[in-house]
Image (cartoon, helix red, strand yellow):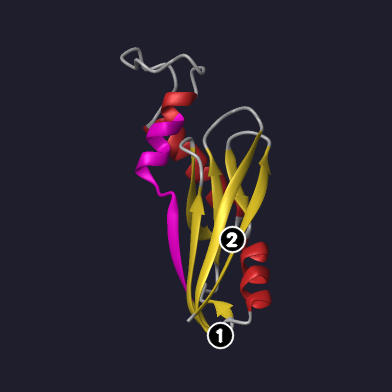
Amino acid sequence: MHQHIDTLTIGTSGQGLYEFTRQARGFVASSGIRTGLLTVYVRHTSCSLLIQENADDDVKTDLGGFFRRLVPEGMDWLVHTTEGPDDMPAHIKAALTQTSIGIPVADGRPVFGTWQGIYLFEHRHRPHRREVVLHLIGEE
């Protein structure tokens, strides 16, 4: 078994989906591993990861709208408010999605579907620099 690990820094400019499929593919290609498992992990509690369609930007718009309606800001029962009105809703959105995703690797490539891409889902309004850890284990 061989393994490779690296950390991507993804700059965000506010709430939304930030695709990093190209960087994940490049990481796998440079590893020399042909068959294995790529684990993608985000090191934060107010953003998350999604595998989602990357062919139509309307999908990103609709997902953002859905989560804003599902977990709106200004819920008067929230206790954790010291970091701003978007912080606790961001934590809830992250809890409803995921911070780690496993992606199979075959023939030296992540096995994404035709229209799939991997995204950092930023839940905060202000810009952030998010760290995403890529860990690949497998056989050359």
Q: Quadrant of residue 130?
A: top right
Mark 1 = which residue? 34
Residue stretch rendered in magenta on the structure: 90-104
* 74 over 94 or under it: above or below: above
Q: Nearer the viewer, residue 134 or 58?
A: 134
Which percent across, then down, holds residue 57?
61, 52
Is residue 31 positioned above or below 127 on the image? Answer: below
Residue 95 on the magenta span = yes
- The image shows residue 50 at horizontal and vertical percentages of 48, 54
Separation of disc 1 and disc 2 at Cα? 24 Å
The residue type indicated by label 2 comes to Asn
Q: Secondary structure at mark 1?
A: loop
Residue to which mark 2 is pinned = 54
**Position of 127 relative to 134 (above/below):** above
Q: Residues within 10 Å of mark 1 (few under 14, many from 20)?
A: some
Q: Are marks 1 and 2 in contact (CB under 8 Å)?
A: no
> Furthest-left residue in view?
77
Residue at 66% from the left image edge and 77% from the top image edge: 29
Indicate left or right for 40 with 88 as reference.
right
Looking at marks 1 and 2 on the same chain, the residue that comes earlier in the sequence is marked by: 1
